[in-house]
Image (cartoon, coloured by chain):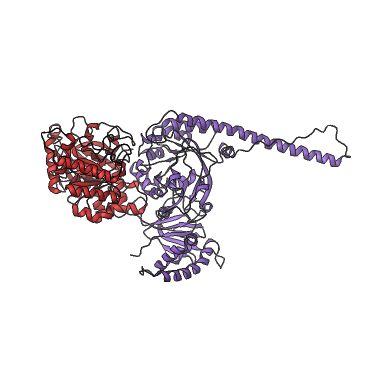
Chain colours: A purple, B red
Amino acid sequence: MGFVWRGASDLMLDRGRWSCYKACNLVHGERKMIDVKNAHLIGTVLFLSLLPVGVRAAGPSAEGKPERIAIRGGMVLTISTNPIRDGTVLVEGETIRAVGRDVVVPDGARVVDAKGKFVLPGFMDAQSSLYVMASEASGSGGGSAEWSVADALDPFIERHEEVLHQGVTAVYVAPSGIGGFAGRGAVLSLNGATRPEKLVLKADAAVRASLGLSAGSQSSSLARLDDYASLRETLIEAQAYAQRQRRYRQDLAEYEKKKAEQEKEKKAGDGSKPKDSEELKRPDKPASNPTHEILAKVLDKEIPLQVEAHRVSDILNALRLAEEFKLSVILDGCTEGYRIAGEIARRKVPVVAGPVSTSFVAMPRLEYRNHSPENAAILAAKGIQTAVGVCGRDGLSSKFITLAAAMATANGMDRDAALRAITLTPAEIFGVADRIGSLDVGKRADLVVMTGHPFDADSRVEMVLVGGKVVYERDTTP
Amino acid sequence: MKRALLTIVAIGLVSVPTPGRAADAGRTLAVRAGRILTVSNGAIENGVITVRDGKIDGVGVDLAVPKGMETIDAGDKVVVPGFIDAHCHLGLSLNAMAEIDETVQPVTAQMRIIDAFDPTADELAQAVRAGVTTMMLAPGGRNPIGGQTAVVKLSGDRRKRWLVKPSAGVEMSFTSDALMSDRRPTSRPGLITLVQENLDKAAGYESDTFAPTAEVLSRLTRRELPAYVRAVAVDEIDAALSVIDRYELAAVLVGAQQADEMAEMLVEREVAVICGPQLLHSQDHDLKRAGRLAAAGVKVAFGSFAPRTMSGDIRTSAILAVRYGLKRDEALKALTINAAEILGLDGRLGSIQPGRDADLVILDGDPLEPASRVETVIIDGNVVYRREQK
């Protein structure tokens, strides 16, 4: 059982006492009750003995070789390729080293028998609020493109491990302001880290904005037109800002160049002033604006713009923004997308559809009025890159990700597409597919071992690896 | 309790003519399927269900299907009784947050929710597509005594054949939702006092005086109507039980999230629980409660509280409850026969056996598998939904 705590050494460092107690319980198996004094003693010994192992797990071991884990004989759903029956996934350090039927398991590797089990990449909820305080996640009111969710993370949020235990290894989280720009979203890893910045797999994965969200379900008004107008206005300002900055950089370069030439002439000459020399003036630095700085990156397609829009008119407005400002847009929510799926497909805009059921959400808004549980299925069938998110009432709801995908299947989505919609597709949409989302050689070892297909009701998560570390193992002792 | 419910059934049957008789007279239908989950009598592999006049005529393996009888061949698919949403507010032309209570007065027992119901409302179609064939409509929880619930079928026609029970019980609320700052009650003790005052008054009700509220409440104290009592937390459930005990009400708890913590008391009193949407909970601890409740011997059904959640998500509730410990057969019963029993309609609904209404759902897999699709929905022997093949 030691390996469990080796993997979770991060957690142990911060929750020393609890972890030690738990570790004692595990080590002693059936011995459920241990007196506290003893627990501390054994715990401390265990804690100390495990500590160096924990450090070693992160990098090469004493022999210079990183830790290896071979998950052998399972039904490997790589997502990127056809399923591999009787396949083995070899993990070395934090990376997947080999995937296939004939993988040679090196000596000294820990072997996990996955016979009869399913091995898949960890799931990703692209509509999560995990690690964000519940009251903050659902807050109304505006934001700013400059706000970054990464600055508001709470790694100690209660019960977050329940999400991990359902096989979720990554979430996309963004500020949730209503109307206009809300802020920068990030892809987070459920690696058990206790420092907020260590949770971040990708900062600035997108800038989030919304169009036409009503503050509640009571009423809506044409004030939602203001969302569109103000987004345009801000983007136009940002365009001008970017232009000013560009011109300044050009002017500065010009100035530096001319200045260098003058210096050269001065040195080469006799010291007298050259006749045609003009008085060089260093260009004035334009005022810096952090919001526009971020939006300049959005205008450069360096950061995608995630637009939450539900009604047809709002979705079309988002598409219009994409065209006008040449943005890479991600449609979020897209409740009535099924009504204009052809149009969305033609623009090749990816969609994070959701929620499959309005039962997931904390408070259904008016925008869900024409909600169809078949939305994701229809969008995907049109060839739109479609991710399925939970869009749950709180951060813990991300644990329902496989349920959400299975329900999308029940409402017409292809089974493989639905599985991709909670793994590789969201990873692609938020720019982390080079690292996570599928079981491919070279990717980070974020993977899940389950007793059956993730959409089957009886399937249970047996083991979760994040970054090659075993961060969860189901306690199968009776 | 049982006798009371039987009386209710009797009243229901007398006051409303058995639907389907005239229009469906002589109409027949046969449904073949790989698996029939009868609920009352286990599973039948490769069976047939025959339907006559909107009622189930026969169920079995070697059933003779007369030549020329209209037949739905569902291949290897699964047939279950139509799902019953035991508590919702659909078809009331309201959005999710709107009031469904007459909150100026705290006691509106005479108000009937059926009078606000539109059987042709668009939102009902989505419930049907998810396999819901019957539901109990209820007032909201903002009045201590809110009004009369009703049971309707989702057959959607205009000839009132959908009406199963115009008055199925009285909705009561012991939650903080029923407390207001500008009218009684403003406090929990005040709420209990107010409810008791009204029930005491009803006990002395004489049928020759005109007092509609007291008239309805007197049916409650005579156990002719059950009380559907909203209570979520342990203290609210406790308060509800004290009133139930005092007036010996035939009662069902609604949305009683923490009921598992008082399961023994509920078993003693034969009080059933209509669980709220399980997706409204996100902590493992809360998701395990429905399973614990059933394991303790409490009769459990599910209510969607639609439009708060989707009516069809009573199935999702059952699936989630199974994932967190509810036994599979209990979960299917919760969606069907348990709800029928709670509504006093198990003589008509909730199981596949001769004499019951032909309300059937065909799925392409087990109903408790989240990925299973609803293929066909039949109400009173009529196909009301068929999934488009793409």
Residue appearing at x 52%, y 37% in the figure:
A328
Q: Position of residue A60 (x, y in %)?
A: 55, 63
> Can you see residue B357?
no
Front one among A263 and B23 = A263
Q: Position of residue B310 (x, y in %)?
A: 31, 40
Can you name the residue that lies furthest to the top here? A222
Q: Is A153 above or below relative to B110?
A: below
Q: Position of residue B333 (x, y in %)?
A: 22, 49
For the C terminus of chain A, the quadrant is bottom left
* A284 sits left or right of B213 in the view: right
Front one among B245 and B331 = B245
Front one among B80 and B227 = B227
Quadrant in which residue B227 is drawn: top left
Q: Is B308 above or below relative to A14?
A: above
Q: Position of residue B190 (x, y in %)?
A: 27, 43
* A298 sits left or right of B341 in the view: right
Residue appearing at x 30%, y 55% in the figure:
B325
Q: Give the tally of numbered discs.
A: 0
For the N terminus of chain A, the quadrant is bottom left
> Can you see residue A377?
yes
* B378 sits left or right of A208 in the view: left
Front one among B39 and B333 = B333
